[in-house]
Amino acid sequence: MIELAGLGANFAGFNLEDINLCIGAGEYFVLLGPTGAGKTLLLESIAGLYNIDTGHIYIKGKDVTRLSPECRQVGIVYQDYALFPHMDVEENIAYGLKQKGTPRQERKELVSNMADFLEVTHLLTRYPKNLSGGEKQRTALARALVVEPEILLLDEPSSALDGQTKKKLHRELRRIHKELHKTVLHITHDLEEALSLGDRIGIMEHGRVIQVGSPQEIFRKPVNQFVAQFFCHDNIFRCQVQNKEGKMKITVETVEFSISSENICDGEEGFLLIPAEGIILSAEPIKSSARNLFCGPVTATKNMGAITDVTLDIGIPLVAKITASSAEDMGIKIGDKLFAAFKATSLHFFS
Amino acid sequence: MVMKPAGFTIIFSLLGSVIVLLIVLPLLKMTLFGDPAIILETVQDRDVIEAIWLSLRASLYATLFCLIFGIPLAYILARHDFAGRRLIEGLIDLPIMVPHTAAGIALLTVFGKKFFAGQLFSKLGIGFVGRLPGIVVAMSFVSLPFLVNSAKDGFRSIDPRLENISRTLGASPWRTFWEITLPLSYRHILSGAIMMWARGISEFGAVVILAYHPMVAPVLIFERFNAYGLKYSRPVAVVLVLICLIIFVALRGLAKRERS
């Protein structure tokens, strides 16, 4: 549906560099990255609001690189909604239909249907200044969707909303995606939002897309330290690979870990990721097939609501995430000696 | 809101009132202490009426001229960053800074009968020296910064993303300008146009060099002051000030009503 081939551009000193990306028809793709990564610029380039210097943009197989925005059939929703302040909700929603020359009666009908779909019918005569954040958001979505764009581009649509309204918007976006089967490109810096909405996620940093995959793939196997940290992994350690008696070991300071990866070489240096969610804790020695078994005192605990972070000193600080009820059952206290076990397959090495 | 100390507010109010008095006192003195009989006579003076009408008309033409050519310029300056933008912005502000008589001389060197542009327009039947077009050009030159700068501020105050959205919804750049940009910057443009018109009506220095005749109101005031003294120039000034005051209060009121 959308294909970006070698897209490159310079915008006042900021570069988008060699971006290659394919988003399938009907896919909900989330582009995740920190502020200043170039996400909005990429989105606006796809919409045709900026000219790119190199590469091509294809929409439904058609090269739209040099087409003006009005010819690309993309709908865009900005984070601050950008509703036309001099028009009421009905006029805002009808704007695109008016530009397309839709007859007045048909326009009225389409606006009414879309207003029903997004539950803004009772707001049609109101002006944007008299709407709440959620109402503005639904109006902006209605305005973008009523013209039936091929692609819906969402620029951090929930960043200005409070927690409850944000959750409601996520439900709404899932419903829109499910019922209208739109191809959606959603950009955000919110990891939770990306994980909860994206069929696939792309990670963006300094104007480059550095990893694309399913939320699980990226979570389990980040390509570099930046992605690992962005996914809030606690246990990322600088390490070295060593071949010991034919078995690959990873050494972090003086601690050795077993890993089952075929793509590492003896002497290679890089980073080791130990997913905190995959660590089993016990007060008794663990009988397990897991090849990584450690023991150490608890140095810190952190209650995160439903989850508790427990830090063990096994020569390096190792964080394990367990449910709060498990932590309570175990009666974990600072200084308690605990056993930890995790599988060699759960470890991930990256350079 | 943080409450300022009373003393602070009082001192600032006293200092500020000096400026208000500087404007109000001479106008009040001139307007209220004139001889009503002479003012009545002035109102019926054909030369005075013609001069004031010419001032209003010529300044209106100058404003319309600058609306047509100045709005696109203001939009380009507001929306595009290009080499030389600051230079052009400086050039637009220049008429505020140069003495207006100097501006008149500069215009004469271009639109005078002996010069290229003057000769070219003369072949088209348009004369500038001592003609209405000369007055319009002089008024445009000195008062265009008010319109262009105000329109530029108006365009800059609009979130460019509104225009982006309009484009993605199928509107061409022209339609976007007419349906989004212009309605949202309308107040700034109207305000700038009123200011420009007002400034044009009061223009003397540049006009007197390019077109002493036909006489606009400020030139007539100057001539009567030179020929007959304060007694006969003051009523003309009073009538001009009163007419301008009525028109501008009405226009401002209209603009305010539109805003609400």
Image: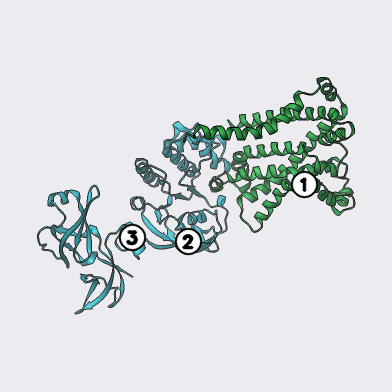
Chain colours: A cyan, B green
The residue to which callout 1 is attached is: B99
Q: Which mark is residue A263?
A: none
Q: At x 86% / y 36%, what residue is drawn?
A: B215
**What amino acid type is highlighted by mark number 2?**
Leu
Whether residue B20 appears in this view of the structure is: yes
User: Are callouts 3 and 1 both on one chain?
Assistant: no
Q: Position of residue B133 (x, y in %)?
A: 83, 42
State which chain disc 3 sits on.
A
Q: Is residue B77 left or right of residue A189?
A: right
Whether residue A27 appears in this view of the structure is: no
- Quarter of the picture containing the N terminus of chain A is bottom left
Q: Position of residue A2 (x, y in %)?
A: 46, 57
Q: CA distance from mark 2 to mark 3?
A: 27 Å
Q: Are marks 3 and 1 in contact (CB under 8 Å)?
A: no
For label 2, count other residues whose C-alpha is less than 10 Å away and answer few (under 14), some (14-19) or many (20+): many
The residue to which callout 2 is attached is: A4
The residue to which callout 3 is attached is: A229
- Nearer the camera: disc 3 or disc 1: 1
Q: Is residue B27 left or right of residue A336?
A: right
- Nearer the camera: disc 2 or disc 3: 3
The residue tagged with tag 1: helix, strand or loop?
A: loop
Q: CA distance from mark 3 to mark 1?
A: 64 Å
